[in-house]
Amino acid sequence: MAPAGTPRSLSPHGTLILFTHLLILLPSNTAAQSIGNGSEIDRQALLSFKSGISSDPRQVLGSWNTTTHFCRWRGVACDNHFAGVIPDELGTLQHLQSLELDKNSLLGVIPRSLGTSGSLRYVNLAYNRLLGRIPEFDKMSALEFLDLSSNNLSGSIPSSLGNVSSLVGVWLDANSLSGPVPETLSLIQNLNVLFLSDNYLSGHVSAKLYNISSLLYLGLARNNLTGRIPSSIGKTLPNLVGMSMSGNRFEGLIPSSLANASKLQSIDLGVNSLTGPVPSLGSLSDLQLLNLESNFLEAHVREFLLSLVNCRLLVVLTLSGNKFSGQIPSTIGNLSQLNELYLDSNDLSGNIPASLGKCKQLDMLNMSFNNLQGPIPSQLLNSTSLSQGLDLSNNNLTGLIPEEIGALIHLVHLDISVNKFSGQVPVSLGQCVQLYSLVLGSNMLNGSIPQSFSELKSIEQIDLSHNYLVGSIPVFFVSMVFLQKLDLSNNYFEGEIPTRGIFRNHSAVILDDNTGLCASATTNLFQLPVCTTTSSVESKKDALLLVKVIPPIAIALLSFIFFVVTLLKQRQPEAGPCYTGTMKKVSYGGIVKATNWFSPVNKISSSRTGSIYIGRFEFDTDLVAIKLFHLDENGARSSFLTECEVLRNTRHRNLVKAVTVCSTVDLENNEFKAIVFDFMANGSLDMWLHPKLHKNTPKRVLSFGQRLRIAMDVALALDYMHNQLTPPLIHCDLKPGNILLDYDMTARVGDFGSARFLSSTPGNSEDLVGVEGTIGYVAPEYCMGYRVSTGCDVYSFGILVLEMLTGRRPTDAMFTDGLSLHRLVNSAFPDRLGEVLDSYIAHEQQNECDKVLKQRCIVHLVEVGLLCSMESPKDRPGMAEVCAKILSLKETFFELC
């Protein structure tokens, strides 16, 4: 992307303009010249460019021929994605001023000839697949903007780049560049933007780089840079608006001179080795983001927060994982624009300030792992908009859980475990109907489980362990279709255990140390004493539940089946609202409005057969993801039908959930098909594993615990598809890009356009498969004429696990001459795994976690990945066995970590 204010058309006199993410401007006298001399050179260069494009699906370049003057060749504004290489002849265009080829699929190296162009002012080759080194650009005397971000460029940054004195903006982030940051960059005295983040740069950063007084944005994050931040940085960079230096090995003090850079809006210094006190930053009245997490900073939190009293625009404040101590001052309520506040893993004491209730925009609050005392202030619960999460676990909080907690009706994650709360579980918690995770374990709660919990229809995890709860286990737990973990251990429950729903899965329910419980004579999964009599009360409740629940479910299911069958008949589509049966009804016009007229800003991703947009329907509050199918592409229609069939036949918490399906015509009477899904707030797993390849990267990396949970979620989804569906369902394209992460980082498998249901007839031709899926994740037998099988997904899962643990794609450039991701990891297993593991896993700190235990868990998970990705299908385990292994591993890890 070009920076704000960067002109897209640099000359009003240009006569040749081509827009397909390509911008070429030539002087106005070109048309008057005959085809010869300089014009002939330009014509030949453009023809060479055309010859280098191997894919032009919409014939954008169809009018580029030898019979028509090149000034009359077609120039269009569209969204085609070029594939191929950039020819060296492109750099010979004598009057080329601006070259914009971003967001395509261009391969190969950047032509050296571009570095000799004396007319180029703007070069944007971002978001492609370019390889090799950055050529020398020192002869580009007019170059102002250079954007090579989000490619696969390697080698060092050319020191000659510092000789291009005309440069204003440089974007080299999200590549594989190595070596030091060239000191010569300090010679570019008019530089406004310098982004070098997400590379493998190392060494000290020259103090001269911090002397470019014109610099507005400095991005050095997520490299391997060392040294100290100069004490004078705020004085030598007085115009700095944003600085991102997190994820390095910077050490020493945070300079107090930062307060002199009065225009600063964003300071990101997290995940470094910074020490000492934190200086006062109160003079930065425009500050919106301050991230100091995971350092070794020592400060009295009261004094530090008092110094921020004038930073009234602060939206995100992250102090996690440091050595802040003392009591939180009431003045924190003056930061009324706060949206996210992370104070966890410090040494804070005292009460939670009631003044936090003044932060009405607060969406996420984490104060876990401190020494906080006293009650939860009701003002916090009544006044804030907490929805992402409230985590107060591992403190010394006391008193009752306030009934006002029911006011947090949009909250998805609540964890107040390992405290000293007493009294009964609030009935009002049943009003928090969007809760996914409820953790109240290790307190002193008493009484029974409220009947209002039956309203928690979206709940996935409930932990009430290690309390003093009594009574029978409520029957309504069996109707919680998304509930995956129920921990009621170490309480005083009694009576017969329900036998349906989640209680059929022994591993999902923990009932240890409840001496009054007994089991049915017909079903005893929990190895408890058999009940002498059947509870008539429970039988009545069960019967009443069946009367209430089964009819509406049956009606909804029949309606949905009728709707999908209607779609599969493929009748001629009619204009008007989309027919969706009992599902949410939407029209083509509604989808147009929801996506802001299919705005590129709303587009999340795109493939050959479809594009996905983020949107919000009129009068709705929740975001949705809308998948539009490119019906003019081969396979798009069958992909739509396959996804409909999968949605009709599946329901699992670890599979993406559809809101509705749309099949109609657009305003030009062209066939239109779309599927609307729940929006996954944390994007895809690919974005977290490889953030430098994506424009909008998450601000936090995945811990080993999170990776373990994701592996468990995906394994459960595959076990459901392979072993609990009839016929079994094979995904056929499992990869990080198709694993989506919800608000609480729950993983959900999506994109079933290539999926297949196994035929029950042996030798059915529908089970034969060619090479489908994505290179690197496709099982070897695909290329050998084997039939599609569950083993294909198991192989992809194995590669997925190894990629999560190493941070390397199976298609990484290093994998040549027979070396693969499996062989790389296997060669280091088990003694040298540290050499191939993702560095974030190797260096992360685990609270109260035995390092030996963590290492053992990593080894076992690597072993699962290696077994699943064995070359021969007969050597791979089934997903039921894989689930059992990972579940045991997960329980061991989280019991002590």
Image: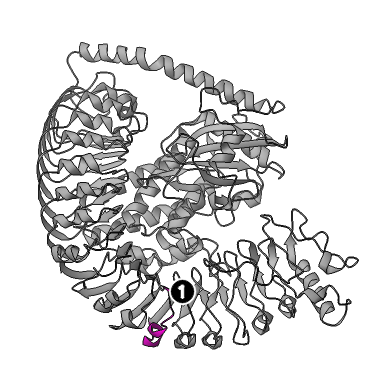
Q: Position of residue 314 (x, y in %)?
A: 30, 59
Q: Amino acid at mark 1?
A: Leu
Q: Position of residue 656 (x, y in %)?
A: 47, 39
Q: Position of residue 588 (x, y in %)?
A: 61, 34
**Does 767 sit above or below residue 164?**
above
Q: Secondary structure at mark 1?
A: loop
**Does 526 sit above or below residue 3?**
above
Q: Residue at x 57, y 75 (%)?
A: 146
Q: Position of residue 209 (x, y in %)?
A: 41, 84
Q: Nearer the viewer, residue 684 or 838?
A: 684
Is residue 731 rendered to the left or right of residue 255?
A: right
Q: Which residues are magenta?
A: 204-217
Q: Nearer the viewer, residue 715 or 337?
A: 337
Question: Which image quarter holds the N terminus?
Answer: bottom right
Is residue 414 rendered to the left or right of residue 201?
A: left
Q: Is residue 207 magenta?
A: yes
Is residue 622 rendered to the left or right of residue 857?
A: right
Q: Is residue 582 magenta?
A: no
- Residue 789 visible in this rendered orientation of the protein: no
Q: Which residue, as the protein is rendered here, is positioned at the far front?
A: 12
Q: Which residue, as the protein is rendered here, is positioned at the far right?
A: 67
**Does 157 sit above or below residue 85?**
below
The residue beneath circle 1 is 196
Q: Residue at x 45, y 86 (%)?
A: 186
**Mark 1 crowdedness (10 Å alpha carbons): few <14, some 14-19, many ≥20:** many
